[in-house]
Image: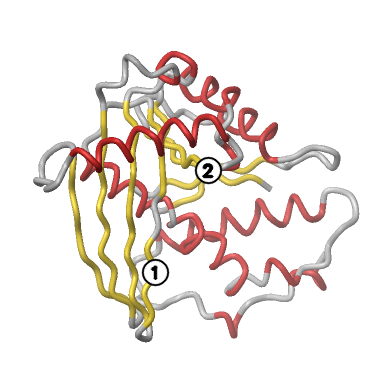
């Protein structure tokens, strides 16, 4: 199942079943067609960095922000070459629309995130090929249990975004994992469900997300979703 999640209101907007002999790359355009996303910023992983998916987003008058990795080799090389040249010529970064940094502490980890955006890309071939308006480099530095890790992540976007807006959007992108997939697995026991016949698995997946949306709107009781109270949905089919 491919899911669409709203990070602003914290609910599942929809899902689409991936065909048995297909993959999520082909399913995502079908899901996007079912959503009213005009004016929204759609964030996606590197696997979804495909021109057909980009076109689906732009067709509905929305913007995209997509991670770029080696599965798009030439695109990734263009971004890395551009930013390597920028860093070699720039000694100091000043916080403005094109650069932003922030620090965070969570779960025993210390993080320092830096983001560079570049919008003057008319000379780059990817501008027309991918309808790109903004290219992005993010360097997250993390220290956990005395061990440090640092790497560079690249993104492209069809919107004119500031560095601060990009950092905010990329952080919110992970809400689909933390607030949807993790909850469905731990609190609803989705991965343990063995319903396979007919439309049982698809119908149960839809029911779980409807239930999750309703539970998230319940504010009269201050309780979390307790995994100890989850139903054995596999036995109820």
Task: Tell me if residue 47 comes above or below residue 158 in the rendering.
Answer: below
Residue 142 location (% of width, % of height): 34, 70
Quarter of the image where one finds residue 61: top left
Percent position of residue 199, x then y:
83, 48
Residue at image position (24%, 68%) is 104
The residue at the point 57 percent across, 42 percent down is 70
Mark with earlier residue (1, 2): 2
Coordinates of residue 210 in the picture (x, y in percent): 57, 53
Compared across the picture, whether 36 is left or right of 135 comes to right
Report the coloring of the rendering: secondary structure
* Label disc, if present, on residue 189 of the rendered structure: none
Q: For the C terminus, which image quadrant?
A: bottom right
* Element assignment for label 2: loop
Give how far across and how far down residue 160 sits, in percent. Answer: 26, 27
Residue 183 quadrant: bottom right
For this rendering, which residue is in front, 18 or 136?
136
Rounded to the nearest angstrom, the CA distance separating label 1 from label 2 is 18 Å
Q: Is 203 in front, or is 132?
A: 132
Q: Which mark is residue 149?
A: 1
Q: Residues within 10 Å of mark 1 (few under 14, many from 20)?
A: few
Residue 53 as seen in the image, left or right of residue 40: right
Residue of label 2: 69
Q: Is residue 29 left or right of residue 60?
A: right
Task: Answer whether labels 1 and 2 touch (C-beta < 8 Å).
Answer: no
Element type where label 1 sits in the image: strand
């Amino acid at each position: 199942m491919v899911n669409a999640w709203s990070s602003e209101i914290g609910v599942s907007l929809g899902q689409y079943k991936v065909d048995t002999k297909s993959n999520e790359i082909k399913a995502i355009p079908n899901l996007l067609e079912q959503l009213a996303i005009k004016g929204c910023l759609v964030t996606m992983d590197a696997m979804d960095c495909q021109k057909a998916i980009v076109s689906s987003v732009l067709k509905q008058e929305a913007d995209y922000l997509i991670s770029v990795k080696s599965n798009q080799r030439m695109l990734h090389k263009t971004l890395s070459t551009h930013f390597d040249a920028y860093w070699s010529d720039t000694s100091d970064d000043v916080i403005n629309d094109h650069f932003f940094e922030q620090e965070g502490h969570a779960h025993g980890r210390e993080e320092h995130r830096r983001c560079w955006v570049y919008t003057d890309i008319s000379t780059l071939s990817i501008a027309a090929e991918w309808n790109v308006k903004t290219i992005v480099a993010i360097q997250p530095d993390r220290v956990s249990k005395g061990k440090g890790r640092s790497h560079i992540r690249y993104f492209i976007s069809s919107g004119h975004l500031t560095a601060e807006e990009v950092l905010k959007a990329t952080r919110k992108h992970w809400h689909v994992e933390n607030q949807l997939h993790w909850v469905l697995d731990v609190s609803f026991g989705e991965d343990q469900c063995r319903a396979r016949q007919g439309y049982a698995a698809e119908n149960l997946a839809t029911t779980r997300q409807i239930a999750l949306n309703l539970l998230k709107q319940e504010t009269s009781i201050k309780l979390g979703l307790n995994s100890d109270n989850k139903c054995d949905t596999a036995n109820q089919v």
